[in-house]
Amino acid sequence: MLAFTENGIFNLSIANVIISIFLLSVTWFVVHTVRKAIFTSLWNVPGPLLCAFTNFPLYYYTYCGKYHEFTLALHKKYGDVVRVGVNQISLANVDELRRVMSTHNFPKGKSYERGLFWAPSTFSTTDPELNKLRRRQTGVVYSMPAMRAFEDAVIENGALSLIEAWDNNIAESREKSDQALVNYFYDFHGIAFDIIGALGFGCNFNIVRGGDWTIIDKIHKLTNLISIKSISPAIARLKWLFKDLYSALDYMMSLADNAQIQRRKDNKSGCQKPHVDILQKLIEAHDPSTGEKLSDTCMIAEILLLLVAGTDTSSNTLSYTLIHLLNHPNILERLQREIRQEFPDISTPIRFAEAREKLPYLTAVFLESMRVNSAVAGYLPRRVPDEGTVLLNKYQIPGGSEIILSLAACHHDKNVWERAEYFDPERFMDNKQGEIRAKNVLVFGHGVRMCLGRNLAWMELYTIMANILRKYKIELPSNSPYGPHRLSNNLDAVGEPENIPSKVFITSTPIDPRRNCRILISNANLS
């Protein structure tokens, strides 16, 4: 309370001081929040009123793995540009997305830095100059000529390894039936990891043949942790709260570190044949201008990128492609007919170049699968340059704001995609329009930050899917939770079979894959 001294000067009690500080703090917070929400050009961008005052909805849905659902709903209601946070804009216009991604004027947002656990990689660095350096150092590693040199290893550790495993499953179940129950999600991830093992480490991890899926679960836990750390580093520091996720991180870091240490020892000893794989190319990689090589810490960052991005994206695309084919038996039948007519000799594996040339419908199926279920559908922010920018010739976006690339919403934009909710590969079969539409599928990014591993991903997709669809009859079990056999219960608003719901932590993954991603396989009658 107020108390006056003999000199007429008053004192404040400790309680009043605390209350005054609290009220001043609250007043400052309210004024600061209102100023950032209202007194900015972002106030003219449509979106939920709550998002102008707090990032909680954006971070909550990102934390829960539902960022894609959040933004899809908002873009459906508000249009191509939506305010999703105090300083964040979600963008789903394909032309504007290309503009943002085409140059280094819009560098990656700070959340990429917050998600780091070691050193910046080609994917995570927010520094344009460092990105240019990394691409000069490692670009040749992922070039198509390099990938063609690795194709035998891709086929051996990919399609042929999976066929061997599935043939064994059929043989083991033959006493009861000619069918075997397999989990395609884990098998696709297993062969993707085995391919990376062969190309990146000079060995085969034998995930598919051994049937041990532990490392696949660890990769998904790692992407979960990266997503959490990128939006809330303070919470992510509470390691006791995420023990399982940090355990996965330690495991993957150790794997990457041991790989490069062992390879350097092998190179120094000279007692083995020279290695010709991605790991060796990374060790030898250098800047053509300066000769600068990757440091040990940067090497580990690139190996981790290879392990995570090199397995999760392609395998999830394979999984979603098969999900859509099973939901549309007529499309599956047409695709298998195309493959078997073009490649009747089952004793010879189908290779990448010939599959891409002779299987246009398979290409269309992949593009449509990538459109409907983008492998990378998470929180992908870009920082607006200091001078600001204008979106759609309408919305003034101030410098320092973040533009989030909403690929899932972009790929469902009804202004670009007719019948966007439908899975329809036919939209890519028209020579002229199909080529234009293919360029609007931005799953590998665009411009200066386009995915370096896209050539390897395409090689895996074509060689794996073409070879297994030629050899096997594939169908869903009668008790499958999703599929056309559940059509009466699983119709969505447009009459399509309901897709397996997904969760997104950077990459998009079907929920509960152990239960939802099972199929029955048997050898096809190819006579």
Image (tube, grey):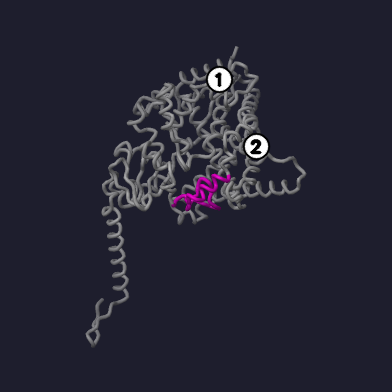
The numbered mark at residue 170 is: none
- At 77% from the left and 44% from the top, the residue drawn is 271
* Rendered-image quadrant of the N terminus: bottom left
- Secondary structure under the numbered disc 1 in the rendered image: strand
- At 72% from the left and 41% from the top, the residue drawn is 274
Task: From the image, state whether disc 2 or disc 1 is nearer to you.
Answer: 2
The three-letter amino acid code for the residue at tag 1 is: Lys
Any part of residue 511 in sight: no
Measured in 3D between alpha carbons, the distance from the residue under mark 2 to the one under mark 1, in whole angstroms, is: 29 Å
Residue 382 shown left or right of residue 51 in the figure? right
Horizontal and vertical percent for residue 419?
A: 35, 26
The three-letter amino acid code for the residue at tag 2 is: Ala
Q: Which residues make up the magenta segment? A: 110-137
Residue 217 shown left or right of residue 347 in the figure? left
Instruction: Report the front residue among 500 and 462.
Output: 462
The quadrant in which residue 34 appears is bottom left
Any part of residue 159 in sight: yes
| Residue situated furthest front in the rendering | 289
- Secondary structure under the numbered disc 2 in the rendered image: helix
Instruction: Report the front residue among 286 and 110.
Output: 286
- At 69% from the left and 40% from the top, the residue drawn is 275
Q: Which residue is mark 1?
A: 473
Instruction: Report the front residue among 412 and 293.
Output: 293
Tally of numbered discs? 2
Is the residue marked by circle 2 packed among few (<14), some (14-19), or many (20+) residues within 10 Å? many
Precedes in sequence: disc 2 or disc 1: 2
* Rendered-image quadrant of the C terminus: top right
| Residue situated furthest right in the rendering | 271
Q: Which residue is mark 2?
A: 198
Reply above or below: 301 against 188. below
The quadrant in which residue 13 appears is bottom left
